[in-house]
Amino acid sequence: MSDSITNLLSTKIADQILKQPGREIKMDEPLISSGLIDSFSLVDLAIIVEDEFGVRIDDSELNADTFDTLEALVKLIESRK
C-alpha cells in the first residue's frame, strides 16, 4: 500500500504544487525545510492528502515535523487509515 501512496503523493506534489510534471521526489527529500514547498503550498498539500486519502489533517499538524518528507506523509496517512 505504501508504494501506491508514495507514487500518488510524488506525482501530485510534482504536478500540482511544484508544477514540474515528471519530477521524481525521493522518500527522504526535505520538502519544507529545504524551501521546496512554502507555507502556502503546504495548505495545498494538506488538501491533496485529505481529498485523495480520506484522512483528516489538523491545523496543528501543518508543519515540517509532519509534512517534510514523503516518508513522514506516508506514515501519517497509513496511521489514519
Image: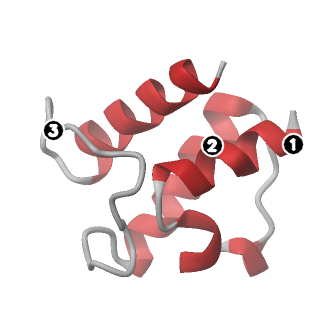
Question: What residue does disc 3 label?
Answer: 23
Residue 11 appears in which quarter of the rendering? Answer: top left
Residue at image position (87%, 42%) is: 80
Identified by mark 1, the residue type is Arg
Question: What residue does disc 2 label?
Answer: 74
Residue at image position (36%, 66%) is: 31
State the separation of the CA atoms marked 1 and 2: 10 Å
Above/below status of 29 relative to 30: above
Lower sequence index among marks 1 and 2: 2
Identified by mark 3, the residue type is Arg
Above/below status of 15 relative to 62: above
Lower sequence index among marks 2 and 3: 3
Image quadrant where one finds the N terminus: top right
Above/below status of 51 relative to 13: above
Residue at image position (77%, 80%) is: 60
Residue 64 appears in which quarter of the rendering? Answer: bottom right
State the separation of the CA atoms marked 2 and 3: 18 Å
* Element assignment for label 3: loop
57 with respect to 63 (left or right)? right
49 with respect to 61 (left or right)? left
Question: What residue does disc 1 label?
Answer: 80
Q: Residues within 10 Å of mark 2 (few under 14, many from 20)?
A: many
Q: Position of residue 19 (x, y in %)?
A: 16, 46
80 with respect to 46 (left or right)? right
Residue 74 appears in which quarter of the rendering? Answer: top right
Q: Residues within 10 Å of mark 3 (few under 14, many from 20)?
A: few
* Element assignment for label 1: helix
Identified by mark 2, the residue type is Val
Q: Residues within 10 Å of mark 1 (few under 14, many from 20)?
A: few
